[in-house]
Image: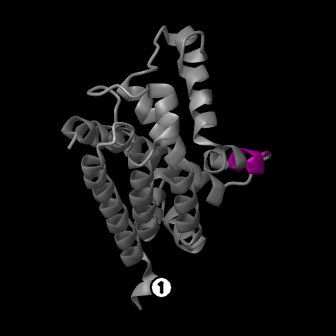
Amino acid sequence: MGWQAFLISIQVTVVATVMVVIVGTAAGLLLARVRFPGIHVFEAVLMLPLVLPPSVVGYYLLRFFGAGGPIEGLFGVNIVFTWVAAVFASAIVALPLMVQAARTAIRGVDPVLENAARTLGDSEPAVFFRVTLPLARRGLIAGTVLSAARALGEFGATLMVAGNIPGSTQTLPLFVYDAVQNQDYGVANLVVALLTGMGLVSFIIIGRLDPARNK
């Protein structure tokens, strides 16, 4: 059924999700609690992958990480057509979902509680980990699950920047594409069913995390 593609997908999804949770939570906190010049531009840039065609996102990544790009110029490293490139592609397209979820969850935390912790001598990191994070945890977990599902299903940007190399960069969505091209519909049906089931489970988990739905 394409166990190599399955394992690569899990590897890419896990690493991409860790990146997305860290960056997305920090960006969500910034957008929810800080006002600064250019905040709307900053937010718009973060949200762009939601509306850009995946091929365009992939092209930007190709130029950024590929030959002659800034990463190669600064570090002498070219990660194009490696599983690491697939990680960045998945992370970029999933990041807006985590940012939105984190911003909404953190805005839902009463600032009075955070200020109370500050008056008791807590530092900003302590306020975040002791007050903000526990109170916003449901929204953050939901954002994590949704981002992981999006990273798992990424296709277009991954194809552009990482290619479709069996055993190296071929993820499950790319495996389905190859199976259909080869008219191997039996295998394609199995993988499609697996991905659909994982997507359904993700939304069930998210629904159970919504307090409004559990009253």
Q: Is residue 93 above or below residue 77?
A: below
- Residue 81: name its quadrant: top left
Residues shaded magenta: 38-43
Closer to the camera in the image, 191 or 129: 191
- Residue 83: name its quadrant: top left
Percent coordinates x, y for residue 21 in the rendering: 44, 49
The amino acid at mark 1 is Ala
Label 1 sits on a secondary structure element that is: helix
At horizontal 32% and vertical 44% (from top left) the residue drawn is 14
Percent coordinates x, y for residue 149 in the rendering: 40, 55
Crowding near the residue tagged with mark 1, few <14, some 14–19, many ≥20 C-alpha atoms within 10 Å: few
Q: Is residue 185 above or below residue 59?
A: below
Closer to the camera in the image, 44 or 86: 86
At horizontal 42% and vertical 49% (from top left) the residue drawn is 153
What residue occupies the far front of the structure in this picture? 183
Closer to the camera in the image, 188 or 67: 188
At horizontal 46% and vertical 60% (from top left) the residue drawn is 143
User: Is 113 displayed left or right of 163 in the figure?
Assistant: right
Percent coordinates x, y for residue 185 in the rendering: 30, 49
Percent coordinates x, y for residue 39 in the rendering: 74, 49
At horizontal 66% and vertical 44% (from top left) the residue drawn is 52
Q: Quadrant of the N terminus?
A: top left
> Which residue is the site of mark 1?
212
Q: Is residue 72 above or below residue 201?
A: above
